[in-house]
Amino acid sequence: MKALKKVPKSKIVYAFSPKHKPAEHVKPGEEISLELEDAFGGQVRDEKIAIEKLDWSKVNGATGPIYIEGAEPHDTIAVRILDVKVADKGIIAVIPKQGALKEKPFKAKIKVVPISGGYAHFEREKVKVNPMIGTIGVAPKNGEQPTGTLGRHGGNMDVKEITKGATLYLPVFTKGALFAAGDLHAVQADGEACVSAIEVAGEVTLTFDVLKNLSISWPILETEDCYAVLTCGDSLDEACSLAVEEAVKALMREHGWSFEEAYMFTSLAVDLKINQVVDPKKGVRAVIPKRYVSIESFHVGDFRH
Ligand code: CA
C-alpha cells in the first residue's frame, strides 16, 4: 500500500494566493495528512512570554498549499475531513483592544491549557474538546488574502462545526484550487468572544473531490444533518443578510418557490448562527436541515466569480 502523503508544518503560508508554488499535489479521493502549527506559530511555550514579544508575522499561518488535480475555476472542491488530532496542550490569550469587549480596559494574559481524556482543563473547570479547523480555504482569483482573514474563498472562518466527519465545499478560483489549512482549535464556542480559542498544534487528514457541475458563491459546510452557508461581511448585519439571501436562493432553486415563499420558509426552518465576531469581517452561517435542500441547491448556474 502506498504511504499516506504527509505535508509537514514547515510548509506554511501566511496568505492564500494563486501565485504560490504547491507544497504537494493530490488526486481526487487520495488521502493526505497535514501537520498544523498552532495559530501563535509555536512561539508560546509557557505563560511567561509577553504578548508584545511575539513575532506577529508568524501568527495564523496555514499548511499548504495543496494542488488538487483536475480542479479548475468555477468547479467546487469537496474537502472531506476524515480526522482532526490535537496536541496535549493548547494556548488561549486575551489581548487588549481585541475581541468582543475590545473597548474595555483589561490586561494581556496567556493561559496554557492541558488537554487530556477528551477535555480541556481550565482552572477547576473542564470543557469537552471539539477539535476544529479555524482557517481553511483556497486561493482567491486575484491578489492574495492573508490567512488571518476570511471571504468567499474560505480562510479564517472559525466555524466550530468544521471538524471530523464534516465536508466543506469551496469554490475554485484558480487551477488546482491551492488549498491550505491552519489555526486548529481544541474547542471554541460560537463567537470566539475573547479573540482566541484553545489554539493548538495537530494534524488533519483529508480527501478532496472535484465537482465539475457545481459552482457555488460561498463556502458550504455539510454536517450529518444540515447544510450551512458560510458568509461574512463588514458587520454582523451584512453577514446575516448575505447568509439569508443564499438560503432563500437555495430554497427557491430546490422547490421552485417564489422569493416570498422561500423568504417565509427561511424564517421557519433556517437557523442563523454566529461563527466569529472578532475579525474585521464578521462571520455567520445559515443552517438548513438536509431534508429541505441538497448540495445542488447551491449551484449558481452560469454565475462567474
Ligand atoms: Ca481563527
Image (cartoon, rainbow, N blue to C red):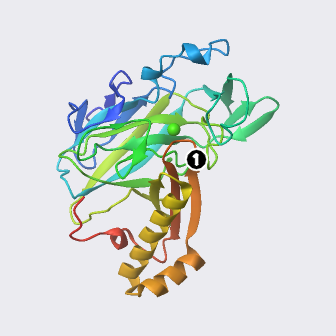
Q: Secondary structure under badge 1?
A: loop
x and y, in percent, of residue 33 in the image: 37, 35
x%, y% of residue 5? Answer: 30, 33
Where does the image place residue 208, in percent across and percent down from the top left? 30, 49
**Toward the viewer: 233 or 224?**
233
The part of the image, by quadrant, that contains residue 193 is top right
Q: Does 18 sit left or right of 104 as displayed?
A: left
Residue at 20 percent of width and 44 percent of height: 176
Amino acid type indicated by mark 1: Val
Which quadrant holds the N terminus? top left
Dot 1 corresponds to which residue? 277
User: Residue 292: horizontal and vertical position, in percent?
Assistant: 47, 77
For the question of whether residue 223 can be seen, the reply is no
- Please say if 152 is above or below 252: above
Q: Quadrant of the C terminus?
A: bottom left
Between residue 20 and residue 78, name the one nearer to us: 20
Residue shown at 26%/65% (left/top)? 214
Q: Is residue 300 above or below residue 35?
A: below
Residue at 46 percent of width and 54 percent of height: 232
Side of 249 relative to 139 (left or right): right
